[in-house]
Image (cartoon, rainbow, N blue to C red):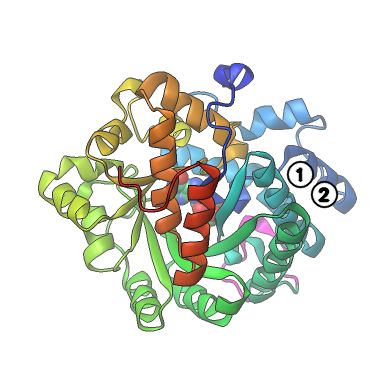
Amino acid sequence: MAEHLTEHIVFNKPKIELHVHLDGAIRVETILDVAERRGITLPACTVKEMTHICVVHQPATLTEFLGKFTEYMHIIAGDREAIKRIAYEFVEDKAKEGVIYVEVRYSPHFLANTDVEPIPWNQKEGDLSPDEVVRLVNQGLADGEKAFNIIARSILCCMRHMPSWSMGVVELCKKYKKDGVVAIDLAGDESLNCEAYPGHRMAYEEAERCGVHRTVHAGEVGPASVVKEAVEVLKAERIGHGYNTLEDQVLYKQLLEQNMHFEVCPISSKLTGACDPDFTKHPVITFRKDKANYSLNTDDPLIFNSTLHLDYSTAQKYMGFTEEEFKRLNINSANSSFLPEKEKKDLVNKLYEAYGMVENTGF
Ligand SMILES: O=c1[nH]cnc2c1ncn2[C@@H]1O[C@H](CO)[C@@H](O)[C@H]1O
């Protein structure tokens, strides 16, 4: 986007990011590097050309946007070194943006080439399972945490169009709870399949039963009823995007009362066609006025050619966000993180300190 070039840092203080896809946050250089090492031909050989291919330039649809992943996922999937590397580099990139705590999400199945049916991205069957993918990402994130002094946790995604994977996803959440996996998510094309299939419902029931935290992509392009289902049936504790909640004022009021957290992604919402491209009409303006609980996030910075700074500067420039609101939303984000209570409290205190605030100063 053009704004990217003129972006400036409007909130140069510690930040929290809760909604970002690992496979939507890969460096273009890394895609080119790995393709070369693996001897896979790409339609582009420079960073500039490859960026052009991966990026959504104009507001599109969610379905068109999701198609962008097919440009490069086959390069990374099935490759142990590449998977560990993208996780490590992700942490480095976030640290550079001033993020001190991040929850990064991905589908282990999308990066595997065995124990997954169908095998994604036209890969040949190999020997990398979703289980090992999670271990590799955990390792890359843990190495990144040590090197760059931030906290990185992960969320495993079920995919809307693949309900048969979902029980496997929740089992991985349970298995790797002690290794930084904090929650389950349901991502993918909400516009194609609105009501959650039994496979997803069963996985979320199991998650709740086992104390695995839950977030769901809902009301991004789908109607408010998807948000209602996420909360009432899937027992979501946070909502990914959630913009269309505003279409159902009864539901919205109820979620405000419950202090439901909305994971808002401003730049993403324009380029996926989820929201009006005029940022001055963005739903997060209503969220802010109502003192709702929400975060600001990049979602897929590779595909939107964006950074977290761009989301913040957009909020400031077009939506009237102030420094005080940035502090408030980051404190809310920390409080809505999926960390255990004690670690959450430490994180919130870190923010209070960095923002020069005494704890419990009410807004
Ligand atoms: O904004 C979004 N809405 C719905 N699904 C998404 C979005 N961004 C990425 N993914 C999907 O989540 C998968 C796991 O990370 C990605 O591969 C992509 O298919």
Residue 31 badge? 1
> Of residues 23 and 313, which is closer to you in this image?
313
Determine if the magenta segment contains residue 64: no
Q: Quadrant of residue 215?
A: bottom left
- The span shown in magenta is 115-126
**Residue type (three-letter) at the residue carrying disc 1:** Ile
> Of residues 318 and 63, which is closer to you in this image?
318
**Residue under the image location 56 percent in, 31 percent down:** 309
Q: Secondary structure at mark 1?
A: helix
In this view, 199 is above or below 81 = below
Residue 316 badge? none
Judging by the rendered image, the residue that carries numbered circle 2 is 34
Q: Is residue 168 visible?
A: yes
Main SS of the magenta part reads loop
Q: Label 1: how many residues lie within 10 Å, few (<14), some (14-19) or many (20+)?
A: many
The percent position of residue 176, horizontal first and vertical second, equals: 59, 77
Q: Label 2: how many residues lie within 10 Å, few (<14), some (14-19) or many (20+)?
A: some
**Residue type (three-letter) at the residue carrying disc 2:** Val
Tell me if 275 is positioned left or right of 127 in this view: left
The percent position of residue 141, horizontal first and vertical second, equals: 69, 61
Q: Where's the N terminus, which quadrant?
A: top right
